[in-house]
Amino acid sequence: MADWNLEVAHNLKRRFTSGLRAGIERPVPTNVALWNLLRRRERLFLIAGPCVIESESLCLAVATFLKKVCEKLGIFYIFKASFDKANRTSPTSFRGPGLESGLKVLANVRAKVCVPVLTDIHAETQAAAAAEVVDILQIPAFLCRQTDLIKAAACTGRILNIKKGQFLSPNDMKQVVDKARHFGAKRLLVTERGTTFGYNNLIADMRSIPIMHKFGCPVVFDATHSVQLPGGAGKSSSGQSEFAPALARAAIAAGADGIFIETHPDPERALSDGPNMIRLSDMPALLDNLTRVFEAVHNQPARPVQAC
């Protein structure tokens, strides 16, 4: 199965690479160049897209819209969507198109919109195939301690985004980062996405931002999953998307390098995580606001020390 997945991914890579050579805008930065952009802390970066791949047309529309908005605001943009949601509450919930079809969509988004692409993997057998197509592999929060999964992802040489488990303290992520580095990962992002707080609720502790910065990795804040109410709707998760903008502002003020947001043109009709997603039409105003906070934090003049 792993060899078959890799062959499919190689074919997809040839397709979108030839498309770029044919003159489709400017190429996506190489993995090293992309990493250098993410780690400099000079420019806010955004990881955003629909929770799950519902259709290629949706992904292309969201990526195109957000790329234009981010270019105008000076934000570096990375498209995100999942080919499979392996941890749905109900066995009948929509999971996505699967690996082969999902990678085709992601390859086309990368080639046609010319943006870096991120997706999550849930099994070691998916790592090599996904790495042939996307720029960043994401380890889901529930799986952040899975040694074999982290090893497989690290061995691809791709940038890794590891989400902090809802069950971990920010200090516990040091062992996760050390594990990934042990297996050869040199380019790592870590993401805060809330901690379990009572039944069907999460809390975002902004202390985690400076704590995880000590690990030597850029820190991302997941604004929409942090307002998720896991299992809050019975057969699915609920959410409080109205609080996501406030938490995103707070995270940037606390020093977050990037923001992760799931967005959809019509969250009420989204096939996954609709209650905690931001409406796509609301993104320009939100991103403008977040950019202003980022600039205020990073360009703030030094204050004189007051004498005792």
Image (cartoon, rainbow, N blue to C red):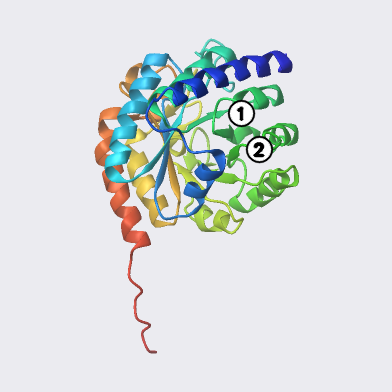
The answer to whether one can see residue 95 in this image is no
Task: State the residue position of label 1.
Answer: 131
Q: Amino acid at mark 2?
A: Gly
On screen, 210 above or below 47?
below
Residue 104 image point, x, y percent: 51, 16
How many marks do you count on the picture?
A: 2
Residue 249 image point, x, y percent: 35, 49
Q: Quadrant of residue 188?
A: top right
Residue 301 left/right relative to 27:
left
Front residue of 223 and 281: 281
Residue 294 image point, x, y percent: 35, 54
Residue 150 image point, x, y percent: 69, 36
Front residue of 172 and 153: 153
- Residue depicted at 31% across the width and 21% down the height: 266
Residue 218 left/right relative to 129:
left
Q: Secondary structure at mark 2?
A: loop
Give the mark nearest the N terminus, 2 or 1. 1
- Residue depicted at 75% across the width and 32% down the height: 148
The answer to whether one can see residue 17 in this image is yes
Front residue of 67 and 281: 67
The quadrant the N terminus occupies is: top right
Measure how far apart labels 2 and 1 are at the Cα level.
8 Å
Which of the numbered marks, if any, corresponds to residue 157?
2
Residue 155 left/right relative to 302:
right
Q: Which residue is situated farthest in the bottom direction here? A: 308
Asked if the residue under mark 1 is in contact with the one under mark 2, i.e. CB atoms within 8 Å, the reply is: yes
Q: Amino acid at mark 1?
A: Ala
Front residue of 195 and 41: 41
The quadrant the C terminus occupies is: bottom left
